[in-house]
Amino acid sequence: EQRVFSGVQPTGNLHLGNYLGAITKFVALQQDYDCIYCVVDLHAITQDREIWGGPEGLRSSTRQVTAAFLAAGVDAEKHIIFNQSQVCAHSELAWIFNCVARIGWLNRMTQFKEKAGKHRENASVGLYAYPTLMAADILAYRATHVPVGEDQKQHLELARNIAQKFNVDFAESAAERGYPDGFFPLPEPLIGETAARIMSLRDGEKKMSKSDPSDMSRINLTDDADAIAKKIRKAKTDPEPLPSELEGLEERAEARNLVGIYAALADQTSAQVLEEHGGATFATFKAALAELAIEKLAPVNAEMRRLMADPGHIDAILTDGARRAREIADPNMNIIKDIVGFIGH
Ligand code: ATP
Ligand code: MG
């Protein structure tokens, strides 16, 4: 059986990277898989409170991410959309995985190093343990495929290592309960060819991020046409015109990023974009890119606004999704607890 699981944090400022790198991929996978898409609110609170915005901010971002899933075309009836904290299995399995994963494994995680910054002693324990919770998110459903951006590749690798170690540590116990190959599948990342890593508009070496303090660094899904046009116009570039061949983009991170964004929005390859726009100045290319971005994002933006005007409806979708998510995760948790040796399951 094949199942897709993925999550997006309600940390405000959903952006073009989330949309092209994750959410549009979520939509495409619905054809071929049973999909579970989670608004990972437990993950959001691992970061500083200014980032997730306190209780009111968390509620409103949770609804915003849900609205983005729906507006992009996720079908909440055929598939499942819910917020993580409504399903206890995530936290319970994360604890078990905290006892499976090794400190040495977590110490290698680059996201923790980036997010904790210089004041590592001051980071939350939750931020450090983020990857074990992410492994639990996926494996509580025994999901086999996980669509993510490039930045999550290392966490997925860790989830596979955790699944593998659990399977080995509890091989006998699992076999006695009818799982001779171990209880967990090793989940595979699905990382797109295009838009796997959209970069900041201010710095071509940094990924576009919700938590970047500069709003000019990203195009938010809630930005109106004027804001989108302005951010693209002001995006950092070099003075050379666009090359006609891909090789000409090497060493030009900002140019490569804008071409990549154009390609993902137009559903083309970067090479095709250069065939058409090679030789153009950035003034010309940015105008074309702004027009395309506005054309593609305006309908999503409008639908998100429409949905967010009725928070009760969004909350009902999350609660219904959580009920259906529990129907999958709870029986799995009973088996997992029994495999570990906890009495009563
Ligand atoms: P934060 O800065 O709070 O971590 P984020 O922008 O990284 O926010 P997440 O909620 O952590 O967003 O990630 C949601 C999904 O979006 C993940 O699959 C992640 O890989 C993907 N993603 C995030 N940023 C980008 C990006 N710049 N390009 C492509 N995909 C991205
Ligand atoms: Mg992130």
Image: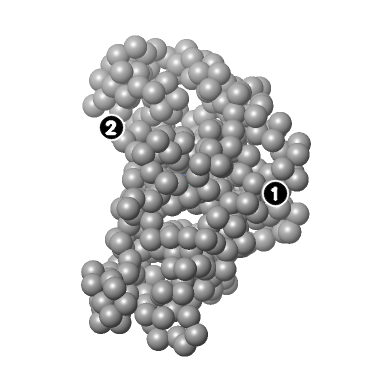
Taking depth in this image into account, of 275 and 221 the one nearest to the observer is 221
Mark 2: amino acid: Glu
Q: In this view, does 173 lie above or below 249?
A: below
> Label 2's element?
loop
Please state the horizontal and vertical placement of residue 153, each as a whole percent of the image. Answer: 35, 53
Taking depth in this image into account, of 324 and 45 the one nearest to the observer is 324
Cβ of mark 2 under 8 A from ligand 1: no
Residue at 60 percent of width and 44 percent of height: 65
Q: Is residue 332 above or below residue 320?
A: below
Taking depth in this image into account, of 150 and 315 the one nearest to the observer is 315
Residue at 68 percent of width and 54 percent of height: 58
Q: In the rendered structure, find residue 250 and report the number of the disc placed on it.
A: 2
Question: Visible in this render: residue 242?
Answer: yes
Seen in the image, is 168 located left or right of residue 298? Answer: left
Cβ of mark 1 under 8 A from ligand 1: no
Quadrant assignment, res 140: bottom left
Give whichever of discs 1 and 2 has the lower sequence position: 2
> Label 1's element?
helix
Question: Visible in this render: residue 255?
Answer: no
Taking depth in this image into account, of 60 and 223 the one nearest to the observer is 60
Mark 1: amino acid: Asp
Residue at the disc numbered 1: 315
For label 2, the crowd category at 10 Å Cα-Cα, with few meaning under 14, some 14 to 19 and many 20 or more, is few
Q: In this view, does 235 lie above or below 277?
A: below
Q: Is residue 7 above or below residue 198?
A: below
Residue at 49 percent of width and 31 percent of height: 236
Callout in the foreground (1, 2): 1
